[in-house]
Image (cartoon, grey):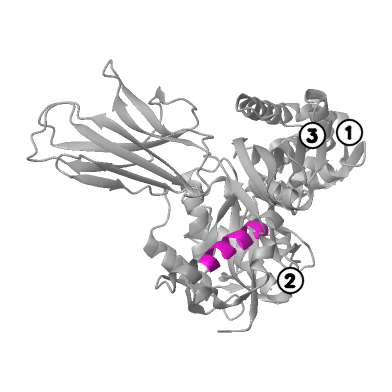
């Protein structure tokens, strides 16, 4: 048994910025500074135009975007699980999973240089509104980066865990308002205490994966373009890809300046003569009021959902760097005067909560391994310093025999329960013979913390006598009712072969949906008379196969990250 101390880490893999935290010897989360000395790292990857096998990540990549916009990828979190291509460099495509993996490799490399001990496994955060495809794609990125992932945790839940461990010593209901750079989540969370244990229960989630601080930046960019053209008489042809990068940087500076000032200036020079353009806080608030209203509507829906379940939130936790905009707190106070506001470590709360959750999962694995003995299941893990692939036990006493840093203390007496983030169902005919989606899993249903999953089985019937097959089509949606209109493409499908069974019309087909706490869906269907069955493999749209993941991991290992 090795005496080398190891710990666990939590990673906030953000749209615009990412952050990594670990559990120290006292059981508390500590954020790791990157090699540039910052606690957060821009989620930006830049490829060297002269040698695309070399890349940099973070602030250097963001700076290089001004020079090489065509060789720079950012905001990939908004398309992960939905779009197979994030960027094309010299004819070679890179998926959002690959770009995210390079960000993860940067974070973990910096951690290996700056942490006082090694780490064994991690938890990665995902937006509460991520579905199965996005979650699977995020896990694929972790595989490419060579990480041993204990699981994922929803971002507002991670923030709530951090708050609950640090500041909540009483029973209370809160709303987590998480406005990040590219996504927006709201979660109603209940904190309670029972016989020395602390219970953190997610009551309901709402959100928009395409709403975040970047949209406020885009509004400022549009304003700067209009003002520049008005002042100079130029048309929008002057704004090429290089100008767009400069405008993006100026927009971020203006937005930050307006968190403490009533006006700020940008100096733009695209026609040979510099122009000063001013932006007041009032104009900024006016031009982005529709964006803020969208968050308020989502917040109200979540609050109403919590009240419908018997909860009465009394506090709003502000999470995410974009909540520093003054308009956020002002509008929330105006719309919800009865709710106290608390700023919950906006940039670091999610990563810290993820590290706390990782400690809990590690402790559970440790005790499970002690009870069950060694597992033969293994994963390939990349040493972030040597970049060599090593074999490591994934579950079992051999893997977890290292000296954990007070794993029980780090996760002492915390019980966490979450809810489903999406609804999932199958296509079937209603009483009128119209194809509809029948949801077996409804959004915001509680996941059993003991089982770690929500499971439901429903019985359907064959539509005609002598049916030779049954097509099981799985759908994902946001409806909170069992029967909804079929208005989208199927997420996945599989067939049960009934050839030769000659079953009568209405013969039973039992369909089972199992959704894990990590947001991974498992679907099975069986015809009980013959025993014929099928399992529906839910694949990410445009996602990577296991072979492609292995190939991408080998490529990532061979490529050189410029430090």
Task: Identify which residue is drawn at 69% across, 42% down.
Answer: 192
- Say which of 417 and 87 sits in front: 417
Element type at mark 1: strand
**Nearer the N terminus, badge 1 or badge 2?**
2
Front residue of 130 and 451:
451
In the rendered view of the protein, which quadrant contains the N terminus? bottom right
Query: Left or right: 312 with respect to 78?
Result: right
Choose between 17 and 530: the one closer to the eye.
530
Q: Residues within 10 Å of mark 3 (few under 14, many from 20)?
A: many
For residue 68, say whether it is visible.
Answer: no
Give the label on residue 280, or none.
1
Q: Of the residues tagged 3 and 1, which is closer to the observer? A: 3
Residue under pointer 3: 328
Dot 2: few (<14), some (14–19), or many (≥20) neighbours within 10 Å?
some
Name the image quarter holding residue 310.
Answer: top right
Q: Which residue is mark 2?
A: 25
Between the C-alphas of marks 3 and 2, the distance is 37 Å
User: Dot 3 lies on which element?
Assistant: helix
Left or right: where does residue 340 sit relative to residue 546?
right
Q: Residue at position x 76%, y 36% from top? A: 316
Query: Is residue 446 among the parts visible in the rendering?
Result: yes
Number of residues whose C-alpha sits closer than 10 Å to that of mark 1, classed few (under 14), some (14–19) or many (20 or more)? some
């Amino acid at each position: 048994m090795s005496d080398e101390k190891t710990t666990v880490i939590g990673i906030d893999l953000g749209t615009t910025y990412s952050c990594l935290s670990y559990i120290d010897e006292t059981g508390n989360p500590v954020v790791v500074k990157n090699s540039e000395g910052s606690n957060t790292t821009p989620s930006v990857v830049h490829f060297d135009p002269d040698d695309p096998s070399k890349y940099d990540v973070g602030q250097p990549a963001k700076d290089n975007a001004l020079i090489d916009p065509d060789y720079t990828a950012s905001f990939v979190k908004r398309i992960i699980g939905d779009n197979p291509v994030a960027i094309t460099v010299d004819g070679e495509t890179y998926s959002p999973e690959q770009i995210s993996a390079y960000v993860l490799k940067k974070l973990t490399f910096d951690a290996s240089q700056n942490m006082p001990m090694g780490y064994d496994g991690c938890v990665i955060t995902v937006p509460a509104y991520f579905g199965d495809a996005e979650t699977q794609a995020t896990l694929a990125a972790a595989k490419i980066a060579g990480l041993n992932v204990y699981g994922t945790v929803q971002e507002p839940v991670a923030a709530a865990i951090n708050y609950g461990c640090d500041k909540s010593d009483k029973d209370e209901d809160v709303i987590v308002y998480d406005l990040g750079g590219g996504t927006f989540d709201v979660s109603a969370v209940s904190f309670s205490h029972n016989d020395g244990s602390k219970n953190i229960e997610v009551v309901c989630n709402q959100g928009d994966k395409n709403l975040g601080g970047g949209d406020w930046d885009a509004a400022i960019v549009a304003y700067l373009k209009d003002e520049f053209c008005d002042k100079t008489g130029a048309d929008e042809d002057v704004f090429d890809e290089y100008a767009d990068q400069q405008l993006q940087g100026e927009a971020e500076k203006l937005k930050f300046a307006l968190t403490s000032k009533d006006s700020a200036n940008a100096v733009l020079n695209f026609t040979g003569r510099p122009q000063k353009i001013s932006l007041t806080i009032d104009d900024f608030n006016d031009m982005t009021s529709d964006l803020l209203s969208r968050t308020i509507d989502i917040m109200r829906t979540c609050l109403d959902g919590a009240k419908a379940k018997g909860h009465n939130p009394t506090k709003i936790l502000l999470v995410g760097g974009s909540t520093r905009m003054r308009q956020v707190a002002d509008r929330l106070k105006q719309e919800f005067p009865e709710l106290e506001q608390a700023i919950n470590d906006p940039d670091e709360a999610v990563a810290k909560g993820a590290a706390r959750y990782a400690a809990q999962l590690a402790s559970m694995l440790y005790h499970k391994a002690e009870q069950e003995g060694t597992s033969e299941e293994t994963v390939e893990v990349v040493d972030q310093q040597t970049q060599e692939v090593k074999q490591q036990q994934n579950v079992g006493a051999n893997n977890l025999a290292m000296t954990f840093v007070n794993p029980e203390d780090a996760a002492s007496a915390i019980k966490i329960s979450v809810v489903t983030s999406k609804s999932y169902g199958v296509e079937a005919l209603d009483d009128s013979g119209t194809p509809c989606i029948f949801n077996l899993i409804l959004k915001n249903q509680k996941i059993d913390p003991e089982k770690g999953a929500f499971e439901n089985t429903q019985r359907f019937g064959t539509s005609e006598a002598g049916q030779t097959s049954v097509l099981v089509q799985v759908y994902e949606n946001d409806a909170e009712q069992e029967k909804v209109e079929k208005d989208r493409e199927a997420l996945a499908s599989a067939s049960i072969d009934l050839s030769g069974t000659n079953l009568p019309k209405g013969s039973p087909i039992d369909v089972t949906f199992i959704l894990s706490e990590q947001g991974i869906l498992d679907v099975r269907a069986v015809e009980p008379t013959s025993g014929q069955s099928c399992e529906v493999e839910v694949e990410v749209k445009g996602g990577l196969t296991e072979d492609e993941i292995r190939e991408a991991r080998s490529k990532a290992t061979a490529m050189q990250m410029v430090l």
